[in-house]
Amino acid sequence: FKISPYPLPLPCLLELENCLPALFASQNPSSVSYKRVNSSAKITCSTSLSDPLGVYLYRRFPSDQDIVYLAFTRRLITKKTINEHFKDRIIVTEDQQITGGNGFTMQLSLLEHEDTNLYYCSWTYFESKRRQTLSSNGTVIIVRGEKIHRAHSPISSKNSSCMSLIPFGLRLFLSERDPQEPCREPVWDFTLILLSITGFIVVLCLFIAALIWRCRRVSAKQTDLLS
């Protein structure tokens, strides 16, 4: 066979533009993500664009809504939270492992039922002196569980009676768990701890009583020998 002198196939040489690497935008996680009320969710947005203007984080329903925008100006990154519902709830970190492109991780904290939606990233850039956008497929976040009442909110008698049995340390541990769980697991765990402590005290008392009885017996034998 004869080796072609061209480094690329002839169709690519004729249409060089079609052979160039395609621009892409990806997102992680790329599937449905289930979260609890008051928990956090991380969305990582990546692109092959080497010099984008910025990136938006949108949520799809009921209509496309801006959440946060990152603007890139002379290697400076400026974050602007557009949606007031997410104010002080978004933390952005740059992904240093992206080669030849850009990537950022956006953490949404204190999730509520209203945050259930499809979230996607949209990068902006200039091409042929025109502003273009490049969007990723998106991530579906579903927030489940009952809403945990805050300190200033009234708490139902059922929950308050249950929470009153739980030490303060355990209450902090439950901050990102299902509010139904305090009545099922922590109270039961606390009961087991109390039973364990009670059992330990009973065994200790029996040991001390046996030790005292033995000492008295030895003392009585010594008295008999002396007499």
Image (spheres, rainbow, N blue to C red):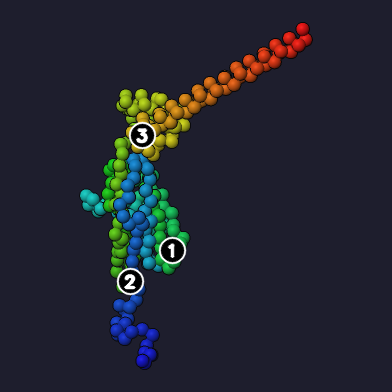
Q: Position of residue 45 (x, y in %)?
A: 37, 58
Task: Say whether disc 3 or disc 1 marks the residue closer to the N-terminus.
Answer: 1
The residue that label 1 is drawn on is 98
Placement of 65 over or under 38, stated as above or below: below
Q: Residue furthest right?
A: 226
Query: Residue at coordinates 30% horizontally, 42% vertically from top-left?
Result: 144
The residue that label 3 is drawn on is 181
**Element under disc 3:** helix
How much space separates mark 1 and mark 2, taking CA atoms?
A: 16 Å
How much space separates mark 3 and mark 1, taking CA atoms?
A: 40 Å
Query: Residue at coordinates 36% horizontally, 31% vertically from top-left?
Result: 184
- Quadrant of residue 154 within the rendered picture: top left
Q: Residue furthest bottom?
A: 2
How much space separates mark 3 and mark 2, taking CA atoms?
A: 49 Å
**Rendered-image quadrant of the C terminus:** top right
**Element under disc 2:** loop
Few, some or many residues within 10 Å of mark 3 (<14, 14–19, 20+): few
Q: Amino acid at mark 1?
A: Ile
Placement of 5 over or under 191, stated as above or below: below
Asked whether the viewer can see residue 159, the reply is yes
The residue that label 2 is drawn on is 22
Placement of 201 over or under 108, stated as above or below: above
Q: Position of residue 38 (x, y in %)?
A: 36, 40
Asked whether the viewer can see residue 66, the reply is no
Q: Amino acid at mark 2?
A: Ala
